[in-house]
Image: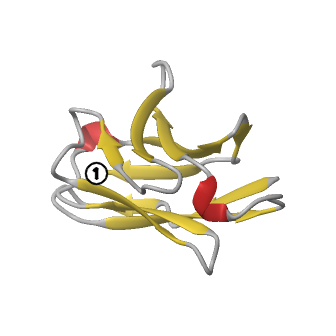
Amino acid sequence: VQLVESGGGLAQPGGSLRLSCATSGFTVAFTHYTMKWFRQAPGKERELVATITGISDDTQYSDPVKGRFTISRDSPKKTVYLEMNSLKPEDTAVYYCYCAGIWGQGTQVTVSS
């Protein structure tokens, strides 16, 4: 299984970015897998940001991002997304895609004016 993130970059406060996590190598249907986005800011522990549950596609968010971030999946493309709106400087971090014990390489998000 391989997870490859993309879409990070520099955004201004109040701006938006969309992260993508392209997956490959799953042995069962992609829709069966619970996918998660984590982030890790400098000097801080890695924290869970958002979850999309397998089959039901129920979503959950951490309090700091609730109402601003949206996790979704495109099953034919085997890709999960994290739409990030109303970005704040404290959203600056490396964002990681995670599934079934596998981590992506991470993508840097920097929010600064």
Q: Is 105 placed above or below 28 here?
A: above
Disc 1 element: loop
Q: Is residue 65 left or right of residue 50?
A: left
Q: Residue furthest front?
A: 55
At label 1, the amino acid type is Ser
Say whether residue 86 is visible: yes
Q: Is 69 placed above or below 93 here?
A: below
Residue 69 in the image: state x and y as whole percent. 27, 54
Mark 1 sits on what residue? 112
Name which quarter of the figure residue 84 lies in. Answer: bottom left
Residue 76 in the image: state x and y as whole percent. 61, 81
Which residue sits at x=70%, y=47%? 105
Q: Is 97 placed above or below 55 here?
A: above
Q: Is residue 4 left or right of residue 80?
A: right
Say whether residue 41 is visible: no
Which residue sits at x=59%, y=62%? 31
Which residue sits at x=70%, y=64%? 29
Quarter of the image where the C terminus is located: bottom left
Q: Is 58 placed above or below 49 here?
A: below
Disc count in the image? 1
